[in-house]
Image (spheres, rainbow, N blue to C red):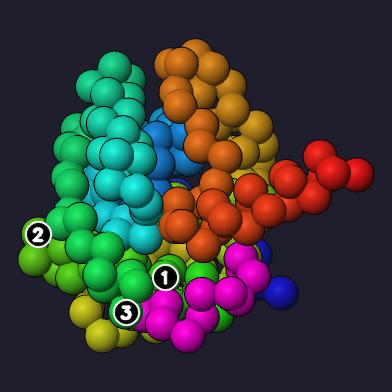
Amino acid sequence: MQNYQKDLEKILEKTGERKTVPRLLLHSCCAPCSSYVLEYLSPYFEIFDFFYNPNIAPEDEYRFRSGELARLISEMKFQHSVHFLEGPYDPERFYEISRGLETVPEGGERCRKCFSLRLEEAAREAAERKCDYFATTLTISPLKNAEEINRIGQEISERYGVTYLPSDFKKRDGYKRSLELSRMYDLYRQNYCGCVFSRNEREKTAGNAAAV
């Protein structure tokens, strides 16, 4: 199995030797997941932190998560610039790719399509801004398949001509550090991934546990 963390470390080592600071378009799913990733990568890149998550529902939840990420960026200190970017909130795009997959358990085909949707938009934005790399915070989650996310990112990279930055941010205690930073900045930590289907699945699981 490919070690994406070691691949990332090799790239960062070479990046640190450059005379100019490369530009990274970082797709961010939420503030808690972004906290460690921004801390880890900001010494190497100028970062455009891109909040594009049309899967999140309801809209109030989406707006709150977006606001938390913007707040985090404004409060953290970085070695190089970090810019907050918000993509369009277009939930119909998510519902279109999810049609027929509404009852598929979290982690299945619906999630794969959702990863592709968000990473493709990140790659498009990265190409428009002439970034050197694009990446995603999604691999910090212990509940998400880093190998699958990296495979999708690498496939999309070839279509847009922007290098995908491989990652497995949960490694090296990355997830643990994100919990520490979440407490430090008093970040809202959601209890479901984002979409209405994952929320319904979590509520059903919680209800069954309570019944027992």
- Pointer 2: what residue? 129
Q: What residue do we see at 37% from left, 52% from top?
A: 57
Residue 49 is situated, as x and y percent measured from the top left of the image, at 26, 44
Q: Answer whether residue 120 is magenta in the image.
A: no
Q: Looking at the image, which is closer to me, 16 or 32?
A: 32
Q: Quadrant of the C terminus?
A: top right
For marks 3 and 2, give the CA distance.
Answer: 27 Å
Disc number placed over residue 76 in the picture, else none: none
Give neighbour class at mark 2: few <14, some 14-19, many 20+ (Cα, 10 Å).
Answer: few
Residue 130 in sight in this render:
no
Residue 113 quadrant = bottom left
- Pointer 1: what residue? 114
Secondary structure under the numbered disc 3 in the rendered image: helix
**Magenta stretch bounds:** 97-108
Q: Looking at the image, which is closer to me, 206 or 167?
A: 206
Residue 34 in sight in this render:
yes
Nearer mark to the viewer, of 3 and 1 = 3
Nearer mark to the viewer, of 1 and 2 = 1
Residue 51 is situated, as x and y percent measured from the top left of the image, at 27, 48
Residue 103 is situated, as x and y percent measured from the top left of the image, at 58, 74
- Pointer 3: what residue? 96
Residue 78 quadrant = top left
Residue 183 is situated, as x and y percent measured from the top left of the image, at 54, 17
